[in-house]
Image (cartoon, helix red, strand yellow):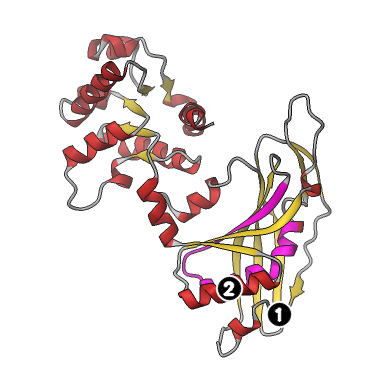
């Protein structure tokens, strides 16, 4: 299952985004917020028009949702959180998403987040002026887009249902439409998420290649079937693998000397995947080679040797990026 942090990073990948860290300070006199420019990340295919004027001074804002605070004792504290300002050029709107780290008092920090969202908006998507690529069309600028109050909060801790209702009401009083995405959101997403790829590998290549590849693909929004992510205690190994091979749109083969010498599970997986190609009459296999020659692969399977493969030697990020382009093209 993907983590909530991964969903925060990938749920809105269709937008142009500006992500940065903020230091939030809970004080009895109000909430302090300071942006950290060294954490700035910009995503999306658009053109950067320019940056705003950096503001490293702490701004103190009053509490939102006073009724939520009444009767609670919360100590003064400082925490770093991440927020992303998103610009959707198709609807010409912008919105915010936040990620609260594990271990934080989620309700407390949710109160802070709805209190400082105006400042966060001005320090992200309005701080970095962006212009999308619209071929042959008049360009539009992100800071001119309409903010309709949408704020998404990703958190790893549960919030009591009555507190959720109070939070949403407090946000509405500020003109915000708050959407909470916690553990239940991740669970429901897992139930409905169809993997775009099955990763077949030799167990001896797990740490060096397979795990790194699976993690890199998930961080790019590609749901993958990978044993460490997909198997639970008590699962039938054979049934789970067969279900994964049938469910995934494509199958990635991590072909190494270990893979080629394995006459156990990887051979079974390869035979199942190759049979699926024959039945579906389309290319299912996406091969990655590491430490093998074309003759090595030919000796294993002549038909596999003629497939265009990615070389792991070009780097984990480059391999993941190229695979993502292929795996997600069916969703566009």
Q: Which residues are magenta?
A: 93-121
Q: Is residue 303 above or below residue 178?
A: above
- Residue 199 in picture, x, y percent from top left: 33, 33
Left/right placement of residue 332 relative to residue 262 reads right
- Residue 226 in picture, x, y percent from top left: 32, 40
In the rendered view of the protein, which quadrant contains the C terminus? top right
Which residue is at the front of the view, 51 or 64? 64
Instruction: Say which residue label 1 marks.
Output: 30
Left/right placement of residue 28 relative to residue 315 reads right
- Element marked by disc 2: helix
Query: Is any atom of residue 1 visible in this view?
Result: no
Residue at the spot x=79%, y=28% of the render? 137
Closer to viewer: mark 2 or mark 1: 2
Q: Residue furthest bottom?
A: 71
Residue at the spot x=42%, y=14% of the render? 308
Instruction: Say which residue label 2 marks.
Output: 167
């Amino acid at each position: 299952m993907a983590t909530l942090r991964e969903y925060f990073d990938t749920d809105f990948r269709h937008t142009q985004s500006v992500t940065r860290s903020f230091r939030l300070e809970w004080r009895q006199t109000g909430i302090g917020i300071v942006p950290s420019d060294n954490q700035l990340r910009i995503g999306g295919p658009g053109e950067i028009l320019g940056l705003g004027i950096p503001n490293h001074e702490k701004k103190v804002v009053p509490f939102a949702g006073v009724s939520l605070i009444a009767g609670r004792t919360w100590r003064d504290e400082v925490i770093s959180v991440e927020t992303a300002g998103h610009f959707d050029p198709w609807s010409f709107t912008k919105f915010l998403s936040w990620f609260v780290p594990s271990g934080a008092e989620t309700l407390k920090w949710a109160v802070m987040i709805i209190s400082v969202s105006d400042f966060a908006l001005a320090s992200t998507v309005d701080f970095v002026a962006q212009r999308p690529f619209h071929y042959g069309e008049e360009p539009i600028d992100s800071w001119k887009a309409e903010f309709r109050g949408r704020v998404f909060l990703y958190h790893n801790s549960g919030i009591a249902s009555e507190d959720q209702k109070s939070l949403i009401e407090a946000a509405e009083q500020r003109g915000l439409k708050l959407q909470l995405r916690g553990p239940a959101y991740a669970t429901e997403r897992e139930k409905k998420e169809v993997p775009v790829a099955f990763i077949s590998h030799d167990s001896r290549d797990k740490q060096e290649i397979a795990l790194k590849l699976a993690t890199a693909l998930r961080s790019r929004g590609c749901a993958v079937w990978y044993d460490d992510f997909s198997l639970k205690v008590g699962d039938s190994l054979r049934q789970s693998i067969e279900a994964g091979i049938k469910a995934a749109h494509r199958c990635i083969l991590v072909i190494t000397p270990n893979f080629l010498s394995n006459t156990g599970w990887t051979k079974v997986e390869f035979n199942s995947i190759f049979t699926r190609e024959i039945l579906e009459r389309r290319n299912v296999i996406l091969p990655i080679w590491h430490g093998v020659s074309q003759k090595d692969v030919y000796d294993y399977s002549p038909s596999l040797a003629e497939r265009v493969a990615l070389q792991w030697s070009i780097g984990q990020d480059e391999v993941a990026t190229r695979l993502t382009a292929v795996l997600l093209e069916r969703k566009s």
